[in-house]
């Protein structure tokens, strides 16, 4: 099993994508000569590997645990929080489903969860960049970096344009130089689900780490965010959010259902400033 040690993350893991509430062509960028790296070739290969991984993850059950806390400016809990534990599983007839197993009454006082937050939980924070999606992004090679003992290629990723109705990732990804899969992401969610909906919203930066679960694919296991959300009305709110993806188990039944097919998006709307 290969994995990245989560150094500072042991105590608090956090999730991004909260919108507090109120009111194609791939650019490989410049490649340092000393690296002797064909960035365009690596981009195409890791996007193909990510497509394989996305299909594989569709056949796994797992538990997702989310915890969001409102903090005071010094980083101390200020009372407001949201917690939820969901099991991603398959029904007897092989359909993918999501079941809430723990959801105490949320006590958030300064932010409101919005649909973008739910969208980010499902697709932006556990970011996957496949061959089918890569034409929507500018991907630029930054250089080589070692994460613990894992050699990686670092890439800057930014959407070419924001299409209403879609959420995108903007930030940095690190790709294992041996398996050619994303092992870490650092960035934030961008884009509107509805025109003008982002007004009054803000989204934190986050880091997501992956771990090699089955000896072949790198699965997201931990997301962390500790950021101050700055709203257009001048208000600010610091939050800490953690997401854990645990107990991955491969489903052995026959199924072609895709991730999220039977999930109710209205269950937990996103964030707006109160």
Image (cartoon, rainbow, N blue to C red):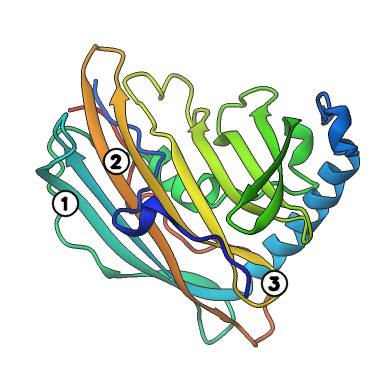
Residue 229 in which image quadrant: top left
Which is closer to the viewer, label 3 or label 1? 1
Give the mark, 3 or 1, whose residue is nearer the N terminus: 1
Would you call the spot at circle 2 few (<14 residues within 10 Å), some (14-19), or many (20 or more)? many
Of mark 1 and mark 2, the one earlier in the sequence is 1
Residue 182 visible within the image:
yes
Q: CA distance from mark 2 to mark 3?
A: 31 Å
Q: Horizontal and vertical percent for residue 240?
A: 28, 43
Q: Residue at x 17, y 48 (%)?
A: 81
- Residue beneath disc 1: 106
Q: Secondary structure at mark 2?
A: loop
- Indicate the position of residue 123 as horizontal and vertical percent values: 54, 49
Q: Quadrant of residue 102?
A: bottom left
Across and down, in percent, residue 187 comes to 52, 35
Identify the residue under disc 3: 256
Q: Element type at marker 1?
A: loop
Mark 3 secondary-structure assignment: loop
Write the residue at 50% across / 81% down: 91
- Between the residue at mark 1 and the residue at mark 2, the CA separation in whole angstroms equals 10 Å
Disc 1, disc 2: CB below 8 Å?
yes
The C terminus lies in quadrant: top left
Of callouts 2 and 3, the N-terminal one: 2
In the picture, which quadrant includes the N terminus? bottom right
Mark 3 is surrounded, within 10 Å at the Cα level, by few (under 14), some (14 to 19) or many (20 or more) other residues, namely: few
Apparent side of residue 34 relative to residue 227 in the rendered image (left or right): right
Residue at the extreme front of the image, as rendered: 34
Residue 256 vs 198, above or below: the answer is: below
Viewer can see residue 265? no
Q: Is residue 183 above or below residue 96?
A: above
Badge 1: few (under 14), some or many (20 or more) residues near its Cα, within 10 Å?
few
For label 2, the residue is 113
């Amino acid at each position: 099993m290969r994995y990245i040690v989560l150094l500072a993350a042991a105590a608090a893991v956090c999730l991004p994508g909260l919108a507090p509430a109120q009111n194609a062509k791939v650019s490989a960028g410049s490649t340092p000569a000393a690296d002797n790296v064909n960035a365009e070739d690596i981009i195409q290969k890791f996007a193909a590997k990510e497509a394989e991984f996305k299909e594989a993850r569709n056949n796994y059950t797992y538990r997702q645990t989310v915890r969001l806390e409102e903090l005071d400016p010094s980083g101390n809990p200020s009372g407001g929080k949201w917690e939820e534990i969901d099991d991603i599983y398959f029904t007897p007839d092989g359909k993918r489903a999501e079941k809430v197993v723990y959801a105490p009454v949320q006590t958030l006082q300064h932010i409101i969860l919005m649909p973008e937050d739910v969208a980010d939980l499902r697709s932006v924070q556990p970011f996957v960049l496949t061959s089918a999606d890569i034409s929507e992004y500018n991907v630029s090679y930054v250089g080589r970096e070692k994460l613990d003992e894992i050699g990686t290629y670092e890439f800057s990723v930014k959407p070419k344009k924001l299409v209403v109705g879609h959420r995108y990732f903007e930030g940095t990804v690190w790709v294992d130089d041996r398996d050619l899969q994303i092992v870490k992401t650092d960035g934030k969610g961008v884009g509107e689900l509805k025109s003008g909906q982002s007004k009054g919203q803000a989204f934190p930066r986050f880091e997501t780490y992956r771990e090699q679960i089955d000896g072949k694919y790198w699965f997201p296991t931990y997301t962390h965010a500790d950021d101050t959300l700055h709203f257009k009305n001048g208000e600010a709110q610091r939050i800490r959010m953690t997401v854990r993806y645990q107990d991955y188990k491969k489903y052995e039944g026959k199924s072609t259902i895709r991730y999220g097919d039977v999930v109710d998006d209205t269950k937990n709307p996103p964030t707006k400033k109160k």
